[in-house]
Image (cartoon, rainbow, N blue to C red):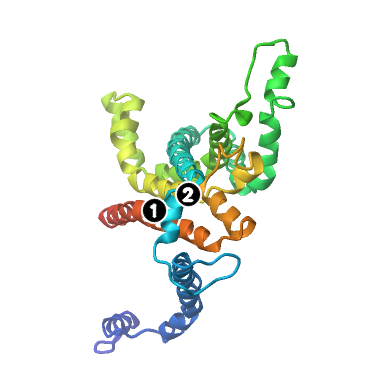
Amino acid sequence: MQPGIPSDLDTARRRARRGGGSGASPWAHVALAPMALTAVVAYLGAALWTLRVSLSSSRSLPKWDFVGLAQYARLLSNDRWLLSLENLALYSVLFVLACLAIGFLLAVLIDRQVAGEGVLRAVFLYPYAMSFIATGLVWQWLLNPQLGMQSAVRSWGVSGFRFDWIVDPDRAIYTIVIATVWQASGFVMVVLLAGLRRVDPELWSAARLDGIPTWRVYASIILPLLGYSFATAFVALLAAAVKLYDAVVAMTQGGPGIASEVPAKFIMDHLFGRANIALASAGSTVMLLTVVALLAPVLYARDRARRVHS
């Protein structure tokens, strides 16, 4: 390179400081425009339309009258809605905690460089790729007292064995927890395994030299380092819990009676089955606000942790 003649690197640096580029930036904004338009119209527009309908007396078709918060008052006095909220709260706690615990154990197992790691990853992740409408029917059969596990175990001579939770009003919701934890734990495993693979191997070497027990390393060092991964998995699991619908429809139809009713099924039933779109819209709005209130602090903490580590 001759003195006084700028190199390509110097030119690129000056263009970057001036905000210039290769000319692709305007086209990038154009390419992102459809996505932005979809987000504004399809998501924000639909949410605002739902809110407006919830303030009307709409039944089968939308009306543009205004009844204030009457639909919300009806919703909060509806025993079926209140039961669905109780079921959702119980389900969410059990589902999220069980998935995080099992997913972490599976990730630790695979991270120990066991034989057949690729096969195990595929086996554990496979349920998450399947539709629960299909697998839910299998779980319904497995949990059926007359056809499934209870019948099989009794046929082996254990006549006193009883596992009829799916037809027990007090325990039906737990069968949905079992089935959905089976489906989602593999997803958590993948997220946490990615976090484990980013841990510096020298930490393990130093721990072994100091004679620190393995469980202490995980508790004191590894788990804090996986905070961002746990937050990511938590957000995805909580969103899935709030949207719970297909597993309930496939396994119990909300029964016995309404024992395993959840908000999404309540909303869909009133939207299509009972022709009460105003009440269904009120339920949807309540759930949206609940999700925002729960996830906003988690997302903020996750993004803050990401900025700190980066």
- The residue indicated by pointer 2 is 242
Residue for point 50% across, 35% down: 110
Q: Which corner quadrant holds the C terminus? A: bottom left
Residue 143 x %, y %:
66, 29
Q: State left or right for residue 45 relative to residue 224.
A: right
Residue 198 appears in the rendering:
no
Where's residue 170, x and y in %? 53, 29
Residue 15's tag is: none
Circle nearer the N terminus (2, 1): 2
Front residue of 89/211: it is 89
The reply to whether dot 2 and dot 1 touch (C-beta < 8 Å) is: yes
Q: Nearer the viewer, residue 54 or 268?
A: 54
Is 20 located above or below residue 263 in the figure? below
Image-based side of 89 in relation to 8, left or right: right
User: Which x, y percent locates residue 265?
Assistant: 57, 50
- Please, what secondary structure does the residue beneath circle 1 have? helix
Q: Residue at x 46, y 64 (%)?
A: 54
| Badge 2 element | helix
As shown in the figure, which amino acid type bears the numbered disc 2?
Val
Residue 296 appears at what percent x and percent y? 33, 56
Residue, disc 1: 290
Is residue 38 among the parts visible in the rendering? Answer: yes
